[in-house]
Amino acid sequence: MTSNRLDRKIGLWGAVFLLIGNIVGASIFILPGQLAGLAGPGVVIAYFIAAVPAIINCLIAAQVGAILPVSAAGYVFSSVVLHPFLGFLKEWVGILGIMVSVPLLGYGFADYMAYFLPQADRFTIAIGLVISLMLINLAGIHASIRLQMILVVIFVVSLLSFGIGGLFYLDWDLLTPVAPNGIESILNAAVPAFYSYSGFITITAIGEEIKNPGKNIPLTLAITFFFVATIYTLVTLVLPGIIPWQELGKIVAPMTSASKIFLPDWFAIVITLSALLAAATSANVALITASRSFFALARHKIYPEILSHLNSRTNEPVIALLLVGLLTMGGIALKGNIIQYASANVIGLMFYGIVWSIGLIRLPKVLPEHYANAEFKLNIPTIWVAAIIKITISVGFLYVGIVNNLGPAGIYAILIMIGAAYYLLRENHLSKKGISLKQILRNEADQVF
């Protein structure tokens, strides 16, 4: 039996604010402008395409979270219904994703901070953001959620104000032709665009801390998707409808520039501040979820046991949190550009999207009692349709992402092989001591049930 459990301290709206803050990060303030430079006004279509796998992710995350509300549920799920090796690779790829997503957020934060501090060093600001968030999280999840709620309300209101207000100032001539660089440019843009939608599955990483997870996890996903899809549609329509797409690709802070055209001068400051807050909230959740993944895998003996240590006062995995902070700062030191970071992250997301989809098909057979008694349950036909769509899109996105980013993809492949080698060595070591990873994970699933 697993004894070092995390407390269920997060309610429905706490989970919603965490998830919105995670998904709507600095990328929406920067990435649509850069992608418009590639795809033209068709950037809004690229985001529509990216929304399709995001919907499938929501369905899978709702099912997994309702059945296995534990830390790193994606790992437990993939390990039990498929194999612990695939479950580990899923988490390994997720950690690699954190190492590219938090730097993206950190540099996005720095780019908008330049509005206030034009001479400040981007690297220093990005590192400072990670250190600040680590200190807040060391104080406990409650402090982190309270901060998250305040910041999310501020930037969501400003984004909706920008998007809705901008509809009245659209220059429809700027939105034609929709695909000046061809349909292929829109498909290529959809891959990094999916990065902006990629955070839904993180809800499963903190399932152990959510109250009434069978009900609240699916509700959290539904509410969050509605707000996120609305915001992204408005922003990607308004930006190229206000500023010519040829110029958007060259602007570092496109939403600040666009807001100056149709909103009062002071609103540019609000938009800039909102971008800072969005980057902070996304990086905050990335640190939380990654630390829970390390904690869970250490609890299951994959990583060193010290990473499963909980602080006696806050009951938080502080050592795992510190490790995640160090890894993300290492990612910041690589100094890649935003599209490279986003594309590399999507390659990993598509890989374990395929793993999750296969696992979803096998779920009713491998965990029949869990499935039969789940508070939220997809019927068998829906499971098959969702899985097939997800696998098809994931293979397509993988191809486009790899072909357009051979360098980052090669590095990613090497890092995945390093993770695979580590797992095989660790499994062999535990096996010699008479410890079965399969049995540990099955016990975890049964204990939750």
Image (tube, rainbow, N blue to C red):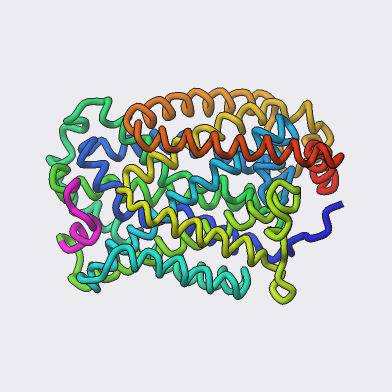
- Provide the major secondary structure of the magenta segment: helix
The residue closer to the viewer here, 302 or 421, is 421
Q: In the picture, which quadrant includes the C terminus?
A: top right
Inspect the magenta stretch and tell me whether residue 27 lies in it: no
* For residue 78, above or below residue 210: above
- The span picked out in magenta is 248-260
* For residue 88, above or below residue 304: above
Inspect the magenta stretch and tell me whether residue 252 lies in it: yes
Tell me: 427 left or right of 334.
right
The residue closer to the viewer here, 2 or 255, is 2
The structure residue drawn at horizontal position 63% and vertical position 26%, both measured from the top left corner, is: 358
Residue 108 can be seen in this image: yes
Q: How many marks?
A: 0
- Residue 119: image x %, image y %? 20, 71
- Residue 295: image x %, image y %? 68, 56
The residue closer to the viewer here, 330 or 135, is 330
- Residue 164: image x %, image y %? 30, 56
The structure residue drawn at horizontal position 58% and vertical position 55%, both measured from the top left corner, is: 289
The structure residue drawn at horizontal position 64% and vertical position 56%, both measured from the top left corner, is: 292
